[in-house]
Image: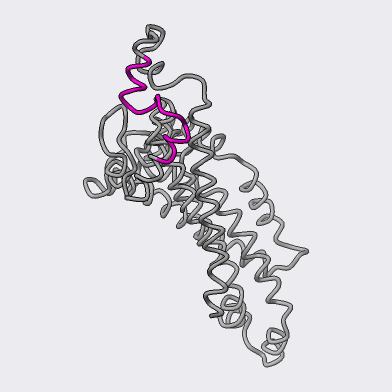
Amino acid sequence: MRLIAYLLPRIAAALITIISVSVLVFLALRLIPGGYADILLGPFVTPEARATIAERYGLDEPVVLQYFHWLLSLIQGDFGVSMVTRKPVIDEFLRRAPVTIELAVLALVVALSFGLPLGIASGTAGRSRGGVARFIGAIGASVPDVVLGSVLIFVFSVWSLWLRVGGYVPFSEDPVGNLRVMLLPGLTLSVFGVALVLRTTRDAVMRVMTEGYITAAVARGERPRDIIRLHVLRNAAIPVVTVVTTYFGFLLSGAVVVEVLFSIPGIGLYTFNGLLNRDYAIVQAGVLLAAVV
């Protein structure tokens, strides 16, 4: 019963959030100036052509009715069909999902590789030292992905330095070529994660270092390396794991800017192109998927 009482409010809050997001994205798309007919036919669109396209895709119905038709299809597992390619959106998502997941995993690995050691070093150094790590954390939390990504694209377009900008190839076809393309977007996406993991690890380590069992371990004459490995890291891991799992969800749902910048054919780029084309089914499903993640 206690578990049910714990879960029910959270499940209810999640459902309310998802429904609210679905309503907002559905209405926002229809409030944006220009529709699919304007994108398709441009300045040559006529009222007759616009009416024909609206009737073909059910856009002539009241907005409330359109929303409930879409929601009912969504509950049945039908994400809709792209108005541009006439392909099911769910099939395109499944085809592109491995690319987005690879990018998120790569960014997470980079964030942990740099954030954990720096956070541990800064936390064990105390407040008076560890200024370099704090500076790196502040910079990482402040620099937007679009700025860092643009700088990296410029630098590696002028000087290749083995890495490549654009020209994505699947990992299964060419692992080395895939890494050459994916490392730059992975690094761009990981900068905020480095700062997040660093600061969380630092705060957790500093908190643990003040506990009585650490003082007791020092009094017993244990080596500093063993104290950190056996006592500090184990007890500091809980907030770090919590933050890392939340950050991974953010990576899966928030890689749109990086995918667009580096032309990575994942779900983010697909959703962005759907927005440009006013392809309602793609954008609605993409934003809702991000909210669920």
**What coloring was used for the rendering?**
one colour
- In the depicted view, which residue is nearer to us: 6 or 208? 6
- Percent x, y of residue 262: 42, 35
- Percent x, y of residue 227: 61, 82
Q: Residue at x 54, y 60 (%)?
A: 12
Q: Is residue 2 left or right of residue 139?
A: left
Q: Residue at x 70, y 76 (%)?
A: 209
Q: Residue at x 37, y 6 (%)?
A: 44
Vertical placement of 82 versus 177: above or below?
above
- In the depicted view, which residue is nearer to us: 266 or 263? 266
Residue positioned most to the bottom: 220
Where does the magenta region start and end?
50-68
- In the depicted view, which residue is nearer to us: 249 or 8? 8
Predominant SS along the magenta part = helix
Residue positioned most to the left: 173
- Percent x, y of residue 286: 42, 41
- Percent x, y of residue 1: 53, 80
Does residue 251 belong to the magenta stretch?
Answer: no
Q: Is residue 27 left or right of residue 132?
A: left
Residue positioned most to the right: 128
Location of residue 218 (image quadrant)? bottom right
Figure label count: 0
